[in-house]
Image: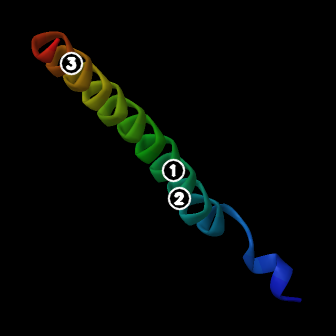
Amino acid sequence: MEWAHMEPVEYKPARRPWIREILAGAAAGVISNLVLEALAVAARHLI
């Protein structure tokens, strides 16, 4: 009987973690790219 509760109200909280995961993944990718670029620049200067 509690399945009736799972309508529009329950969908929004379910979507937010998805968006957060995508944003977190994108942010992690950008940060890792910046770190790799910084390391590459540092390596060029050291060599």
* Labels 1, 2: front one: 1
* Cβ–Cβ under 8 Å for marks 2 and 3: no
For marks 3 and 1, the one nearer the N-term is 1
For the residues marked 1 and 2, what is the alpha-carbon distance in whole angstroms?
Answer: 6 Å
Within-10-Å neighbours for mark 2: few <14, some 14–19, many 20+? few
Residue underneath mark 2 = 17
Disc 2 on helix, strand or loop? helix
Residue drawn 64% across the image and 60% down it = 11
* Cβ–Cβ under 8 Å for marks 1 and 2: yes
Disc marking residue 12: none
Within-10-Å neighbours for mark 1: few <14, some 14–19, many 20+? few
* Cβ–Cβ under 8 Å for marks 3 and 1: no
Residue underneath mark 3 = 43
For the residues marked 3 and 1, what is the alpha-carbon distance in whole angstroms?
Answer: 32 Å
Within-10-Å neighbours for mark 3: few <14, some 14–19, many 20+? few
Residue 35 position in % (x across, y down)? 26, 31
Residue underneath mark 1 = 21
Q: In the image, what residue type sits under mark 3?
A: Ala
Up-down relation of residue 35 to residue 42 (above or below): below
Disc 3 on helix, strand or loop? helix
For the residues marked 2 and 3, what is the alpha-carbon distance in whole angstroms?
Answer: 38 Å
Which residue occupies the extreme front position in the image? 47
Residue drawn 82% across the image and 87% down it = 2
* Labels 2, 3: front one: 3
Q: Quadrant of the N terminus?
A: bottom right
